[in-house]
Image (tube, rainbow, N blue to C red):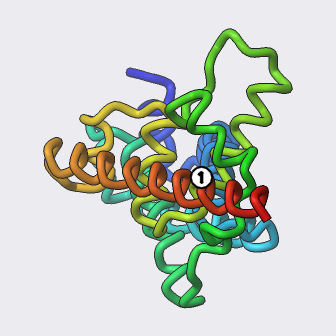
Amino acid sequence: MTVDKELLRRCQLGDQAAFEVLVKKHERRVFGLVYQMVRQPGEVEDIAQEVFTKIYFSLPQFRIEASFEAWLYRITVNQCYDYLRKRKRQAQVTESDLSEEEAAFFERFGSITQPRHLDISKRLEIRQTAERLLSVLPPKDRSLLILKEMEELSIEELTQIFKSSASAIKLRLFRARNQLKAVYEKSRKKEKGKHRV
């Protein structure tokens, strides 16, 4: 039995200490995903708290043999969608807000993964640029790309989280990447136009 499964079994028996360990083990991942999706630092803790509250009250029904991580991601993503629906917010960053430097990110690296050969400060800069570019996307596409490219989940794991077929996930990823490419090209043309003036 894995550590998570043992913790979950203890949680289902009412062990509060086991739930605290489970939260501590996964809170950083939840906080990171919430921040990536809602882009509101002041709201992250409240939303993450709601995620763990939902998990706590749903644990008695959770099947130990199922993937806890997929379940955790699904609850987190859905909680973020609920928050964004209530706020009726659009993505905070528009295409016109992207600088030439941020747009050039795609030209240099071609994807939103972090090249391993770069030093830590460069990788941090790339991650921040990727986060800014991702914020242009609608929440559903953003969450999918974050989980695939930044959390490095497999297509199979994504099918469990989004309850969708592998082909549907691949199609959504393809469209989201194309949208980012279009954002890059549009902002690059805009920057070139500014330099001509």
Whether residue 17 is visible to the viewer of this picture, yes or no, is no
**In front of the other: 175 or 143:** 175
Which residue is drawn at the image coordinates 50% and 64% (left, top)? Answer: 137
Q: Secondary structure at mark 1?
A: helix
Residue 27 location (% of width, % of height): 67, 47
Which residue is drawn at the image coordinates 56% and 64% (left, top)? Answer: 136
Image check: 118 left or right of 179? Answer: right
User: For mark 1, what is the residue?
Assistant: 33
- Furthest residue toward front: 196
Which residue is drawn at the image coordinates 74% and 70% (left, top)? Answer: 40
Residue 15 location (% of width, % of height): 57, 47
Q: Is residue 33 above or below residue 119?
A: below
Name the amino acid, label 1. Answer: Leu
Image check: 4 left or right of 21? Answer: left
**In front of the other: 16 or 172:** 172
Q: Is residue 174 above or below residue 163?
A: above
